[in-house]
């Protein structure tokens, strides 16, 4: 039997090239090797305020983008989180087995709540729902960018804790961090990661950006002092980020990219990064538009929902009985 891989990208904004490198590209790479679960975590996205109409639209768009990127509905189970009620049900049980101390250490919560007056409880408990997403399907591996590693660690801890108390129930998942592109950085502040929900759209290249916007954003990306194009994440995070983007989209190693730009100036680097992105995204966007206009999204989601439910429902039922719910 194939091992299982699971991942999801929130419909909380337009997908960025960071989401492509850390998320979708990994799925395309592994979909033959693993039984793959790719879901749309709409329940996660309301941990910060969302406009309902926009959320409806984005769920469809994100699935069309998965397909355009080469994710195969024949090989993968593609579904919407909120269409499978067992995610929320299991999340509650896991929440009752989680500790305030471990939850308070989550760096993403700290980053996302910083400076906010009113912080939703969902933002705090989000990693528990993510653990439920993973454990419900007995996923062996979870490909993520570096930002989600701590959350996968929580899923591991919860699985082990539950198994110890109630007997072997959950598979303990492993994170799968890509070697290149695990952390594409914000173009305006390369000390931060690029995020689709970042406030300033100039900080991210979106998969749906028109050519002009892509070029403008890359040309005005913040670089570092000095002149040489070298990969040095600590001292040259801006230049290193551009080299990483180049390597990810030109499909070469960062070392090869560094060699390619030996003696080049920052301006040359930016121009070539913009060129590879434009070439890649132009083709992707054509496919995306054709898929959105066809009935492929609904077909994919109906099939995926039924397949996911067939696995999630008996797993939840087992857990529910183990903790003592129901009439036996
Ligand atoms: P949000 O700002 O709403 O949290 P996000 O851009 O962080 O959006 P997520 O939906 O949280 O995206 O994550 C989707 C996937 O993309 C995950 O696998 C995550 O690890 C990966 N990812 C997110 N940002 C980056 C990044 N900058 N570089 C590489 N991978 C990333
Ligand atoms: Mg995120």
Image (tube, rainbow, N blue to C red):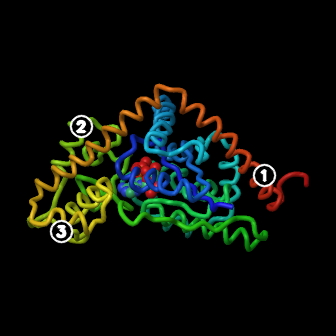
The dot on residue 314 is 1
The nearer-to-camera label among 2 and 1 is 2
Residue 276 position, x and y percent, is 25, 48
Is the distance from the Cβ of mark 1 to the nearest ligand 1 atom less than 8 Å?
no
The dot on residue 285 is none
Q: Quadrant of the N terminus?
A: bottom right
Q: Residue at the spot x=26%, y=42% of the render?
A: 278
Residue 275 position, x and y percent, is 21, 46
Is the distance from the Cβ of mark 2 to the nearest ligand 1 atom less than 8 Å?
no
Residue 298 as seen in the image, left or right of residue 272: right
Residue 106 as seen in the image, left or right of residue 256: right
Mark 3 and mark 1: span between their CA atoms? 53 Å
Question: Are circles 3 and 1 on residues that touch, CB within 8 Å?
Answer: no
Badge 2: residue crowd in 10 Å (few <14, some 14–19, many ≥20)? some
Q: Residue at the spot x=60%, y=68% of the render?
A: 156
Instruction: Find numbered disc 2 in the image and state the secondary structure of the residue it sits on.
Output: helix
Q: Which residue is mark 2?
A: 211
Instruction: Find numbered disc 1 in the image and state the secondary structure of the residue it sits on.
Output: helix
Badge 3: residue crowd in 10 Å (few <14, some 14–19, many ≥20)? many
Residue furthest to the bottom in view is 164
Q: Which residue is mark 3?
A: 230
Counting residues from the start of the chain, the first of labels 3 and 2 encountered is 2
The nearer-to-camera label among 3 and 1 is 3
């Amino acid at each position: 039997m194939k091992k299982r891989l699971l991942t999801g990208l929130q419909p909380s904004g337009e997908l960025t090239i960071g989401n492509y490198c850390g998320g979708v590209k990994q799925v395309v790479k592994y979909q033959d090797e693993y039984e793959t679960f790719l879901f749309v975590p709409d329940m996660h996205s309301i941990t910060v305020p969302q406009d309902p109409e926009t959320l409806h639209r984005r769920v469809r768009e994100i699935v069309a983008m998965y397909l355009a990127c080469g994710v195969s509905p024949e090989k993968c189970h593609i579904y919407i989180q909120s269409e499978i009620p067992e995610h929320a049900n299991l999340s509650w049980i896991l929440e009752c087995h989680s500790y305030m101390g471990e939850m308070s250490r989550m760096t993403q919560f700290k980053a996302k709540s910083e400076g906010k007056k009113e912080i939703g409880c969902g933002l705090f408990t989000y990693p528990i729902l993510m653990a439920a997403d993973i454990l419900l399907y007995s996923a062996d591996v979870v490909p993520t960018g570096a930002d989600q590693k701590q959350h996968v660690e929580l899923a591991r801890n919860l699985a082990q804790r539950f198994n110890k108390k109630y007997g072997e129930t959950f598979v303990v998942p492993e994170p799968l961090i890509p070697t290149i592109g695990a952390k594409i950085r914000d173009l305006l502040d390369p000390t931060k990661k690029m995020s689709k929900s970042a406030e300033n759209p100039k900080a991210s290249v979106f998969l749906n950006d028109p050519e002009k916007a892509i070029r403008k954003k890359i040309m005005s990306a913040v670089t570092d002092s000095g002149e040489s194009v070298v990969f040095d994440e600590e001292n040259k995070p801006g230049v290193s980020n551009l080299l990483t983007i180049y390597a990810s989209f030109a499909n070469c190693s960062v070392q090869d990219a560094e060699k390619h730009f030996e003696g080049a100036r920052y301006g040359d680097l930016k121009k070539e990064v913009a060129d590879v992105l434009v070439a890649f995204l132009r083709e992707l966007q054509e496919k995306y538009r054709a898929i959105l206009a066809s009935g492929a999204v609904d077909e994919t989601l109906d099939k995926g929902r039924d397949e996911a439910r067939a696995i999630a429902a008996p797993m939840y039922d087992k857990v529910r009985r183990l903790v003592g719910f129901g009439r036996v």
